[in-house]
Image: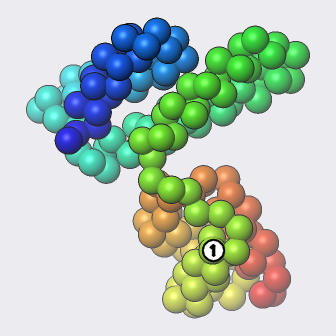
């Protein structure tokens, strides 16, 4: 079942149960899928990798908005963003965190032969490919920087 089919089925259920937050999140995903399908060269299709990037982009946008709303003391708008983030994250793979993520990045540093902060680009390139969709980019960058600084 494609992401679009899952979203459509979820939208029907959300409408029946009158779950406004779920419906809002699913509509956002559907709109982004339609937009991606109509881009030049897409041929009306979105690859699994494209779907993953699309979902990550949606979560990142909402997290950025959430941060702004919290700074501006707008709990009503922040609540809506949190609800949509929860809906979108259901379609993403389990996120790596903590020691597991630290171990994987340490292995990548060893595999790339990185010796210090000057090799951050090389490590980030490999980490981005290996951890696509499994970890937040900011968290990966922070850990890479920390581990490379510890080596020098």
Name, please, the residue furthest toward the left. Answer: 43
Position of 38 with respect to 140 (left or right) is left
In the displayed structure, 91 sits above or below 5; it is: below
From the top left corner, tell me how far across and down residue 45 is, in percent: 16, 35
Q: Is residue 27 visible?
A: no
Pointer 1: residues within 10 angstroms few (<14), some, or many (20+)?
Answer: few
In the displayed structure, 116 sits above or below 121; it is: below
From the top left corner, tell me how far across and down residue 136 is, in percent: 60, 53
From the top left corner, tell me how far across and down residue 91 is, in percent: 42, 41
- Residue occupying image coordinates x 60% and y 54%: 137
Q: Quadrant of the C terminus?
A: bottom right
Q: Mark 1 highlights which residue?
A: 100
In the displayed structure, 62 sits above or below 142; it is: above
Position of 45 with respect to 64 (left or right) is left
- Residue occupying image coordinates x 52% and y 89%: 111
Toward the viewer: 32 or 76? Answer: 76
From the top left corner, tell me how far across and down residue 37 is, in percent: 22, 28
């Amino acid at each position: 079942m494609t992401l679009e089919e899952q979203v459509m089925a979820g939208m029907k259920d959300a409408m029946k149960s009158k779950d406004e937050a779920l419906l809002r999140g699913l509509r956002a995903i559907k709109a982004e899928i339609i937009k991606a399908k109509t881009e030049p060269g897409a041929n009306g299709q979105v690859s699994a990798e494209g779907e993953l990037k699309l979902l990550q982009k949606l979560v990142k946008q909402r997290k950025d908005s959430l941060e702004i709303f919290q700074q501006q003391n707008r709990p009503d708008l922040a609540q809506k963003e949190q609800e949509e983030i929860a809906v979108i994250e259901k379609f993403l793979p389990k996120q790596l965190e903590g020691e597991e993520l630290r171990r994987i990045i340490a292995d990548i540093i060893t595999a790339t032969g990185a010796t210090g902060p000057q090799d951050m680009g090389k490590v980030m390139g490999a980490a981005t490919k290996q951890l696509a969709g499994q970890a937040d980019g900011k968290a990966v960058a922070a850990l890479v920087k920390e581990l490379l600084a510890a080596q020098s």
